Image (cartoon, rainbow, N blue to C red):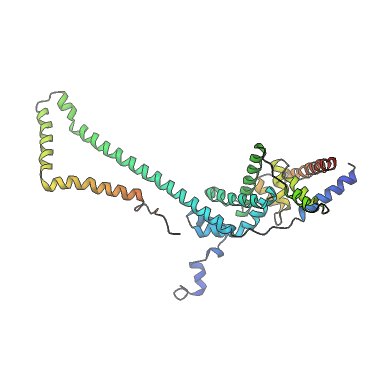
Amino acid sequence: MTFSEHAELDRVIEAALRNEPLRPLPLDFHRRVTDRVYVRAMIQSERRRFRRVLVMAGVTVMAMVACGMLFVLIADIPGLVRNGVAGGTGYVDYLATSSALFLSGTGTFLAFLITPAVALIAFLSLVHGRFTGTQRRSA
Amino acid sequence: MTSAIPASLSRFWWPRVTERTDVELVRLAKKGRDDAFSELVRRHEHAVYNLAFRFMRDAVLAEDMAQEAFLKAFRLLHNFRGDCAFSTWMYRVTCSVCLTEINRRRRRGEVELQPQHAAKAAEDPDVSDMPELIRHCVTKLPDHYAAVITLYYLRQVSYEEIAEVMQIPMGTLKTWMHRARKRLREIVEEELSGRDVL
């Protein structure tokens, strides 16, 4: 191609690209986009809530285990039993007996049942999102 | 509300989303306000759709890509720091989405059943379809050339804004524009030669 032919082609290309009209938007485009964005927002929200619940459940379980271990360490129950400390077995017996006596009372037994039940209800409510403010909003 | 608050202050206390700037709307959208992002979509949907169409050269694909661009923008909204205009950032996201799709189709060897310009020529062979052929050739350019050419010929996009969208200096942009035009001319010549042979 010669220089003038190149120049002519350049002019044609320039005209074709510059004169392309703007296209009208498809009908309902805005509604379709916002609907998809809403779904994506709900997915993100649910993922965040799930992660939060998992973390809280994990922290709760670890705290319970830590408290149990702390009690065993403070009371040094294994040491008492292992070293045959005078009165050690008696102390363990004392703990078992006192626990049994504690649970034998109706009031205390109910308290022992109700406390974890309340904790379970609170946990289930947490899973359903009532405390974390991430319930589904009505459309 | 207007009875409790003086009219001169009501705008200050509770401006509607339509009265807020793009940066304020982004800030509200990050906090979870659906109406804020909806207003951003309303303001920029026309430009995004037309930019997507100029890449994809198909109305249905352009609509898909425009929707994907807004979804990607929503997902990456936390990355928008306000150091450029929201429209500039949207152009960048749209270019990225469209070029990714074009490359994906190219890798998979997907071809249109009948390109639009060929469809028009088939309907009325006497009508010259040169402009549509040229516009279709833009999609065959390398990604960065296609992006700068498309943005340049999209109305109301200045050289400075294109440089900001592509995150390149002005000098580099001018070089790319020159090379893009040259490469586009070569592609158009090849297309025309191919048609003449056929």
Quadrant of the drawing holding the N terminus of chain B: bottom left
Vertically, is B177 above or below B28? above
- Work out whether residue B129 or residue B8 is closer to the camera in this orientation and state it: B129
- Work out whether residue B60 or residue A107 is closer to the camera in this orientation and state it: B60
Q: Is residue B183 left or right of residue B63?
A: right
Extreme-top residue of the structure: A83
Extreme-bottom residue of the structure: B3
Residue B18 image offset from top left, x and y in percent:
56, 64
Which residue is at a point 56% across and 50% down the rendered structure image? B73
Residue B129 image offset from top left, x and y in percent:
80, 51
Residue A38 in sight from this viewpoint: yes
Residue A15 image offset from top left, x and y in percent:
80, 53
Which residue is at a point 84% across and 40% down the rendered structure image? B197
Residue B80 in sight from this viewpoint: no
Residue B59 image offset from top left, x and y in percent:
66, 53
Which of the 4 image quarters holds residue A34? bottom right
Extreme-front residue of the structure: B123
Which of the 4 image quarters holds residue A89? top left
Which of the 4 image quarters holds residue A91? top left
Which residue is at a point 63% across and 49% down the rendered structure image? B94
Q: How many numbered marks are there? A: 0
Which residue is at a point 61% across and 57% down the rendered structure image? B44
Q: In this view, does A67 lie to the left or right of B43?
A: left
Quadrant of the drawing holding the C terminus of chain B: top right
